[in-house]
Amino acid sequence: MAPPFKRILLADADATAAMAGHIAMALGAGDTLLLQGDIGAGKTTFARALIRARLKSPKEDVPSPTFTLVQTYDAGDLEIWHCDLYRLTDPQEVLELGLDDAFIGAICLIEWPDRLGPDLPTDALLCHFSAQTDHHVLTLSGSARWQDLLGDLHV
């Protein structure tokens, strides 16, 4: 994975939602975001905000996929897959979810991407979240393709 190219201070949930909204509008079919960070670092909050922004539905019910593993959303021209792989114990289980097809035609938000093992998409955007005492930090890294696509983020 490439070195970080954006480090963003997220002061609160509103700042997280605003950043997720900016990124949501830049995404298209085949784009994958790998959401890393400890429990409570803001991965699910970010994913919910991104999905709501992309659907243009701020009240959309976006449950955590912790137990279902995958939640899908119809965004008109494509699907959004929100996956929480925390409970997977073997990368082979990923194949059963159908993620290989989703990586091609959907927007994929993957929490706990380390569970993908060797099936980690090589051109994904890595979004690393860390919780600080009074804020969160989002560090983005990926290929030059992402730097160009997200270069206009206002932070």
Image (cartoon, rainbow, N blue to C red):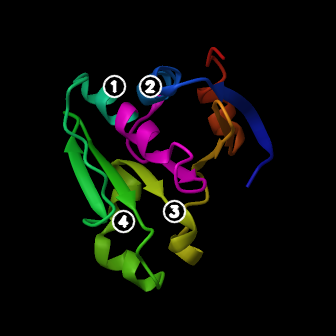
Residue that badge 1 annotates = 53
| Three-letter code, disc 3 | Trp
Looking at the picture, how far across and down is residue 145, in whole percent? 64, 37
Q: CA distance from mark 2 to mark 4?
A: 25 Å
Instruction: Identify residue type, mark 1.
Output: Ala
The residue that mark 3 highlights is 112
Label 1 vs label 3: CA separation? 22 Å
Residue depicted at x 19% and y 38%: 61
Which contiguous range is marked in magenta?
A: 26-49
Is 95 placed above or below 24 here? below
Q: Quadrant of residue 50?
A: top left
Q: Which residue is mark 4?
A: 99
Position of the C terminus by quadrant: top right
Please identify, in this view, whether the residue under mark 4 or under mark 1 is nearer the observer: 1
Residue 93, percent across and down?
38, 81
Of circles 4 and 3, the one toward us is 3
143 and 39: which is toward the camera: 39
Using the numbered discs, state the Cα–Cα distance from disc 1 to disc 2 in whole angstroms: 8 Å
The residue at which mark 2 appears reads as 17
Instruction: Name which residue type carries label 4.
Output: Leu
Residues under numbered marks 4 and 3 in contact, where contact means CB atoms less than 8 Å apart: no
| Marks 2 and 4 close (CB-CB < 8 Å) | no
Residue 33 painted magenta:
yes
Find numbered disc 2 in the image and state the secondary structure of the residue it sits on.
helix
Q: Viewed as shown, does residue 121 lie left or right of 66?
A: right
| Nearest to N terminus: mark 1 or mark 3 | 1
In the picture provided, is 7 more to the left or to the right than 149?
Answer: right
Which three-letter amino acid code belongs to the residue tagged 2? Ala
